[in-house]
Image (cartoon, coloured by chain):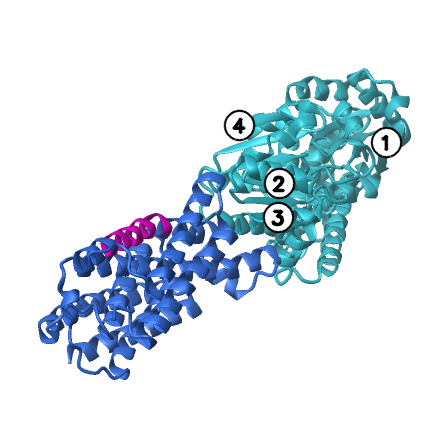
Amino acid sequence: MLFYITLFLYLAATSGYISYVITLKKPISILSTSILIASFILHAVVISLRYPELGHPPFIGIETLSLLAWAIVGIYLLVEWRYKVYVLGSIVSPIAFILLLLTVIIPEGEIVVPPYLRSVWFPLHVGFAFLGNAIFSLACAAGIMYLIQERQVKGHHLGGIHKRLPSLEVLDEINEMCLFIGFPLMTFGIITGFIWSNAVWGTFWKFSPRAIFSLITWLLYATLLTGRLSVGWRGRRAAVLAITGFSIMIATYFVINIIWGGHAFK
Amino acid sequence: MNIIVVGLNHKTAPVEIREKISFQPAMLEEAHGKLLQTQGVTEGMILSTCNRVEVYSCVNDIESGIREVKEFLSAFHGLPLERFEEHLFVCSAEDALRHLFRVASSLDSMVVGEPQILGQLKEAYQTSCKYKAAGVILNKLLHRAFSTAKRVRTETKIASSAVSISYAAVELAKKIFGSLDGKVVMLVGAGEMCELAAKHFINSGIKDIYVTNRTFERAERLAEEFKGTPVNFNEFQHTLHKADIVLSSTGATHYIIKPEDVTEALKARKQKPMFFIDIAVPRDIDPKVNDIDNVYLYDIDDMQGVIEANVKGRSKEAEKAEGIIAEELKVFIHWLKTLDLTPTIVGMRERGEEIRKLELNKALTFLNGISPTQMKVLESMTSSIVNKLLHHPIVALKTHAKDHYRDMYLEVARNMFDLADKEKEEPDQELEE
């Protein structure tokens, strides 16, 4: 029941944010934010109630989508509080809604939690990776908005879209902030992954497509971070890299995790 | 009484000449004094901005007046007349009035509709009043000019185009930089429009302003006005990297900011975005600059494009403005014509006759029937009272009609006998704005 209320609230927040983007009326944005905060809190309750029911941490199988949605919304709320970019809300809240909806739609078989997932390092590994992913998803959304806005400004066509998108500098700052916070989290995720792997299998590196793609993504973000700090890669280039990085991450998640059944541990 | 304008502006003279003839604020007291001492000049006002130096005067004779004012300019600036006479423009009577009204309404500005000129004109008028150079005619004329400008501003969309360019520039900058707090602006060249846009930027919270200009003194002057830093024109490209926003409006015939300059500046500022606004015609900045990452270039047409929807049919608006000016001109010329001896005396006599008849009729209603002889006595008595009352004022008017106080006496007489036009002139509130 609580779950469906949460789902409904995400839908309400989505329509709220979208109508704000259309009308640009201040009260609507405040209302939408309140709804989103309510759904975020309720979602937390749903996840924590579900934990004992499942008998395993919500880090495996389809439950991960719910967790991902929750993390993205949480981080978005922080960004909104800092930068007042309500337009981003119109992207984030539908994503949260869809992710949560998927957990109902996609049928899930009985999950037998293998003993190697019972290590303490596993939740840490997944937790960090999750927060990282959530942050990078925002960087990607900001990147897409940056490219659209940049096109408007550079092309001297300033239409309605232009008016509704935040300034280039703010979008770039969000990108930067996401990189600065997301990259260490991702790095921790990978390090704890190594430790976990070592604790379970006695080796730091176990070959799996997922691990490889994670490393590729990590390298990409590392390059972006270095470029930004040393020679000032920003704006367009940073936006494109943030979008690319997140696309690889999504592809990894869906193609490898769901279709191939996660890390090839067998 | 004749009104003449002698001067030069951005249409008639290059900036080098304009600068030599311009009047610094500190010179104005002496200049107004000298102007009034000029043969045949009864009133005067000096308008000196970076785009124009114009001397408005009331003279007894047009031809000699023009010659004298030209001599005044030459003598005051210690510059032989031959050096700049070809750049001077001269107009008189109705043309001079129309010119003033067009200047006040910003129809004569480099960027038509820019609002600064009205403020400058008001300042010039106040200065002229302060040094007692403006008299009855210039007072009336300038107030008429101000109200004309106000009408043009409110009844046409002429003004909105110039303002909206600066406004659009600030809005665009906000879309690039978010907040403008702590941003740095650089002015390359110093046209009216640049100054105007710079003011908008300053009001939006920018931190610092650099000014560069071909003549360094002018850059210094403008920098002082904006509390900024003047930069040498020959090497301003090396300061470019400090600026987030660059406003360019020089008279250069070729591109003065090239892609390589900008690439270099970007490297120095770690690719932080830059916003270039090129108001110059022909353009100052190579359009290829817009292809560089993190650089946004808008020329005057792009800016116009941005605000196009708001300001449609510019020429129609200009036509409307000229119409308003023609109307106001008519009112003023009508007033000017009344400021002659004969109509004033006739008016005074008519007013006296009017009162006499009114009072006589009133008296007759109390007297039940009087003989024609008695009537004649009454008539001649009242007439002679009126005539005797009017005698001295009329003599005084006639005496002063030949001297310096002519216009003042005429105006006072018209006011005392309530001969002024029905339409009341606007009080000084125009100046307060």
**Viewport quadrant of the N terminus of chain B:** top right
Nearest to viewer (mark 1 / mark 4)? 4
CA gap between label 2 and label 4 equals 28 Å
Q: Amino acid at mark 3?
A: Ile
Task: State the extent of the magenta-drawn residues as a range.
Answer: A179-193
Task: Confirm whether residue B359 shows in the render.
Answer: no
Chain letter of the residue carrying label 4: B
Residue under the point 23% across and 61% down: A126
Q: Earlier along the polypeptide chain: callout 2 or callout 4?
A: 4
Compared across the picture, whether B124 is left or right of A50 comes to right
Task: Confirm whether residue B374 shows in the render.
Answer: yes
Colour of the chain lettered B: cyan
Chain letter of the residue carrying label 2: B
Compared across the picture, whether B221 is left or right of B344 comes to left
Q: Would you name the residue on which mark 3 appears?
A: B292
CA gap between label 2 and label 1 equals 41 Å
Instruction: Provide residue B328's location: percent of width, then percent of height.
Output: 72, 50
Chain rendered blue: A
